[in-house]
Amino acid sequence: MEQRFWLLVSLKLAGEASPEELAEFSELLRSHPEWSLQVELFTNIWQQKSAGRKKPESFNHHLQRLSSHLSTPVLQYEQPKKRHSLKIGLAIAATLTGAFLLIGLYKYTRHPETANGYNTVSTRPGSRSRIQLPDGTLVWLNADSRLAYKVDAQGPSREVQLTGEAYFDVARDKSHPFLIHTATVDIRVLGTAFNVRSYGNEKNTETSLFQGSVEVSLHNNPEQKIILQPYEKLTVHNNQMAVTGFKPKPKPQDDADEPLMTLGKVHYQQQDSSYMETLWTKNKLAFDNNTLEEVALQIERWYGARVTFTDSNMRSMHFSGIFGDESLAQVMEALQLTGDFHYTIRNKEVTITP
């Protein structure tokens, strides 16, 4: 049945599907809503690639960021079903006779059913993706991020679990609140647009609001709820909330003077007519007075690289800047021009020295 479904997808995208085949496709999609995310992803790539033979710069940049090896998955699906793996390619009609070519861009993986009943999608370092959840909510996933969503869309609420960074444009549904769970905070919304950054190896969790309102509660103090208004950003210091699997552990002494959380404004960039917090959704790598240690983490995720320091004292230097299509070497060269350090690059291994 799955092979038939993906053949119908290819015929539909190529404009070769008959009315009967389109009806069959719609019926299969209604019967298997868990396939909608993959269809959305393939459709986006197809539309971008087929929008003229000019190959837009944004699409070329996206392909460059995806992978140099087609066999490496860009977006991985983990679904609570019987365990087996299946490579799924986007079927592209090659001729009017119906021949098609399977291109192995993605790997689709099914996993045994779990008690919490979640499906999971994830991006690897060096890639970013846009997906649509079954309720119509649009989610942009940054590199090295993981989003789990509830299989049962008929429950009292729509719940997802996030590790990494994502921009949400939540479909409005007053009777079914949208809940986002991270390692340190929970976020409750009805319908709005906002960005959440919650990487396990970063010191802060950030929630930046752009439309509507959201309610943020801290895991170690769930009674305290913070209501954000448009263009406000809540920053929670992870080390004071330090958790492992949502269980609190003692905070490091070095962070004793850090505030538990701060409320500020999102950073508008006049030059780009956009906000620093969402530039990544436009394939722009942005540093906003970040330490070199924080910059290194972003570079690792953005380029799928590894960054090491030979002198820990360099980690505290601060940098700001915005990069578009620059290569890893170009970014490092620009940082070196404004910072007092040297670097070497070998096979995506970056070593920073005094």
Image: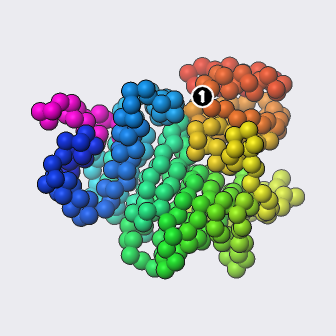
Tell me what residue is drawn at x 33 percent, y 47 percent: 108
Q: Which residue is mark 1?
A: 325
156 lies above or below 273: below
Q: In the image shown, does 125 or 322 lie closer to the viewer? A: 322
Tell me what residue is drawn at x 28 percent, y 43 percent: 13
**Left or right, 49 with reference to 203:** left
Q: Position of residue 9 (x, y in %)?
A: 25, 47
Q: Position of residue 219 (x, y in %)?
A: 66, 70
Q: Amino acid at mark 1?
A: Asp
Majority secondary structure in the magenta region? strand
Q: In the image shown, does 60 or 204 lie closer to the viewer? A: 60
* Number of residues whose C-alpha sits closer than 10 Å to that of mark 1, classed few (under 14), some (14–19) or many (20 or more): some
SS class, disc 1: loop
Q: Position of residue 118 (x, y in %)?
A: 41, 64
Based on the picture, tell me whether residue 64 belongs to the magenta stretch.
Answer: no
Q: In the image shown, does 13 or 77 lie closer to the viewer? A: 13
Residue 25 placement: quadrant:
bottom left
**Left or right, 47 with reference to 56:** left
199 lies above or below 149: above
Tell me what residue is drawn at x 22 percent, y 35 percent: 93
Based on the picture, tell me whether residue 102 belongs to the magenta stretch.
Answer: yes
| Quadrant of the snapshot with the C terminus | top right
Q: Position of residue 209 (x, y in %)?
A: 67, 61
Q: In the image shown, does 134 or 249 lie closer to the viewer? A: 134
**Left or right, 250 with reference to 346:** right
The span shown in magenta is: 87-106
29 lies above or below 335: below
Q: So how many labels did they put on this image?
A: 1
**Left or right, 128 with reference to 311:** left
Report whether residue 295 is seen.
no
